[in-house]
Image (cartoon, rainbow, N blue to C red):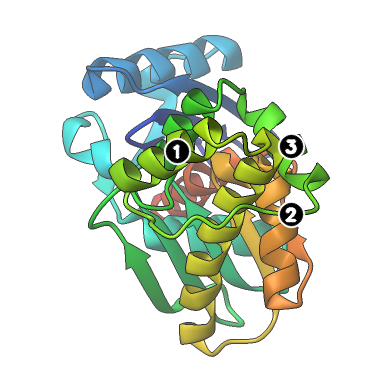
Amino acid sequence: MMGYVIGLDMGSTTTKALLLADKEMIYEIRPTGVNPHETGKMLLSLLCSRAGISLDDVACIVATGYGRVNAPYASIKISEIACHAKGAYFINRNVRIVIDVGGQDSKVIAVGSEGEVVDFYMNDKCAAGTGRFLDIMASTLEMSHEEMAHAALSSRNPAKISSMCTVFAESEVISLIAKGARKEDIAAGLCHAIADRLASMVRKLGVKGVIMMSGGVAKNTGLVNILGKKLGEKIYVPDEPQIIGALGAALIAKEKNRRY
C-alpha cells in the first residue's frame, strides 16, 4: 500500500503544500512570511489534519523553492525547475514549455516527451518582471492584481515602459501618472514589458509545443493574453497555477517512495 507523500514549494512570497495519496490530493497556499521554517511546519500539520493522519504516516516529503534550505523536516530537497516540469507534465502531457513567474525570479523550461527537463532559462538576478515587480507596480497604480489585469485588457493605447528595473520602472509609472496617462494604458504597458522579456526567453529555447504558465502571475489574465499574442500561441493556464511546483515535488516524492 502506498503511503502519503507531500510536496512543499517554499517560494519567496508564498508557500504551497500538496498531499498526495492513492486517490486524494489536498493542498494549501499561505504567505511565506518572515519564517519559512515555521510556515512549512504549519502547512504540513494543516494538511495532515485535513487528511486525518499524523506526520508519521507521511512516507516522503520533497521540498523545493528558495525556502527549501529551511525545511529540515523534508526527506529530499530538489530544484524548482524539475518540480515545475514534473507538475506541468502531469497536468497536461502535451506541455513542452513551462513559463513560471515567481515572487523573485522568472524561468522558462523546455519539457521533453517523458516530462523530463530538456533546457531552461532563468532570470534571478533582480526583481525585473517578477511577481514582486507586479506587486510594486500594482501598489503604485493603487490597483489590485485583478484590477490591473482587467485594466490592461481594456487598453487600446499601451504606454511605453522602457525600463524593467523595478526602481526605474516605478519612477516611469509615477511620471506617466503625473502626465495624465490612463491607468489602463500604464497597466497594459507594464504587461507588454514583462511579456516582451518572457517571450524572448521562450524564443531562446527554440522549442515548439503547448505552453503552460504556472505561478501566481499566471492569474494575471492581461499578461497571459498579451504574452500569447506576442508568441502567436494560446497560453494554457491550469485551474490552480500556483500549485504546479508543489504537485511536481509530491510526484517526485511518490516516485522516491516506490523505490524503498
- Report if residue 218 is visible in the image: yes
How far apart marks 2 and 1 lie (CA) works out to 17 Å
In this view, the residue in front, 184 or 247, is 184
Residue tagged by mark 2?
A: 157
Vertical side of 137 occupied by 41: above or below: above
Q: Is residue 21 left or right of residue 237?
A: left
Residue to which mark 3 is pinned: 151
Badge 2: residue crowd in 10 Å (few <14, some 14–19, many ≥20): few
Q: Which residue is mark 1?
A: 175
Q: Label for residue 237? A: none
Amino acid under disc 2: Asn
Disc 2 on helix, strand or loop?
A: loop
Q: Nearer the viewer, mark 2 or mark 1?
A: 1
Q: Is residue 256 left or right of residue 2?
A: left
Residue at 51 percent across and 64 percent down: it is 85
Amino acid marked by disc 3: Ala
Image location (x, y in percent) of residue 93: 71, 69
Out of 260 and 177, give the one closest to the viewer: 177
At numbered mark 1, what does the secondary structure look like: helix, strand or loop? helix
Q: What residue is drawn where x is 26% and y is 23%?
A: 36
**Whether residue 75 is visible:** no
Whichever of labels 3 and 1 marks the residue nearer the N terminus, that label is 3
Q: Secondary structure at mark 3?
A: helix
* Nearer to us: label 2 or label 3: 2
